Each structure stands twice: as C-alpha cells, then as structure tokens.
Amino acid sequence: MSRRPPQRRPGSPPGAVVKLTQAEAAVVARAARGLSNREIATALRKSPATVKGQLSSVYRKLRIPGRVQLILMFHR
C-alpha cells in the first residue's frame, strides 16, 4: 500500500496538513476504495465500531461531513 501525504483541510492555507494516525490512514485507504465499515473491519481485524470511530475522527480532522467527501478527496 502506498503512503499518501497528509491531506490539507478544506479552507486551510496552502501547506497546512492534517495528521492521521497509522490506524486512521489504514481505514481511510480502504474507505476511499469504497469498502464498507464491515469490510474494512474484517480486513484490518477490528470491530466495525472501531472503524466507525476512526472514520468519525478522520471526518472531524478533515472538517468534512462524511464518506462521500472523503472518497471525493482521494479521487480528484
């Protein structure tokens, strides 16, 4: 899996980055490919509740409302 640089927050000045934990980055990589929370949980050997919590944390950090915006960030 290739590593992506941290994403800039929408509306942030150029050069501003959001730092994700390794666990959050692993979840984001799979969510951006369209996997469901259950599929991500199975692949990473986590509970679906843990995946949901990690995605919620990512959404807060990126200041986005949800998965659709996350996917759009990675497919531009």
Image (cartoon, grey):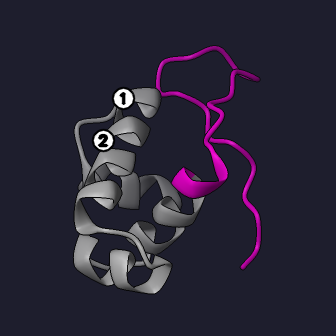
Q: Are marks 2 and 1 in contact (CB under 8 Å)?
A: yes
Q: Left or right: where does residue 41 sit relative to residue 5?
A: left
* Camera-side residue of 33 and 51: 51
**Up-down: is 18 above or below 21?**
above
Q: Residue furthest top?
A: 13
Vertical position of residue 15 compared to residue 19: above or below = above
Q: Give the residue at x 68% y 28%.
A: 17
Is 51 magenta? The answer is no
* Residue 60 tag number: 1
Q: Nearer the viewer, residue 16 or 21?
A: 21
Local crowd size for mark 2, using a 10 Å CA cut-off: few (<14), some (14–19), many (≥20): some
Which stretch did the figure color magenta? 1-24
Q: From the viewer's perspective, is 16 left or right of 50?
A: right
Q: Closest to the observer: 45 or 40?
A: 45
The quadrant where residue 62 appears = top left
Q: Is residue 55 above or below residue 15?
A: below
Q: Is residue 2 magenta?
A: yes
Residue at the image position 69 percent from the left and 42 percent from the top: 6
**Residue 10 shown left or right of residue 35 in the figure:** right
Magenta segment main secondary structure: loop
Q: Residues within 10 Å of mark 1 (few under 14, many from 20)?
A: few
Q: Is residue 11 above or below residue 3?
A: above
Q: Is residue 36 visible?
A: yes
* Tally of numbered tags: 2
Which quadrant of the rendered structure holds the N terminus?
A: bottom right
Instruction: Identify the amino acid type marked 1.
Output: Arg
Label number found at residue 56: 2
Mark 2: amino acid: Ser
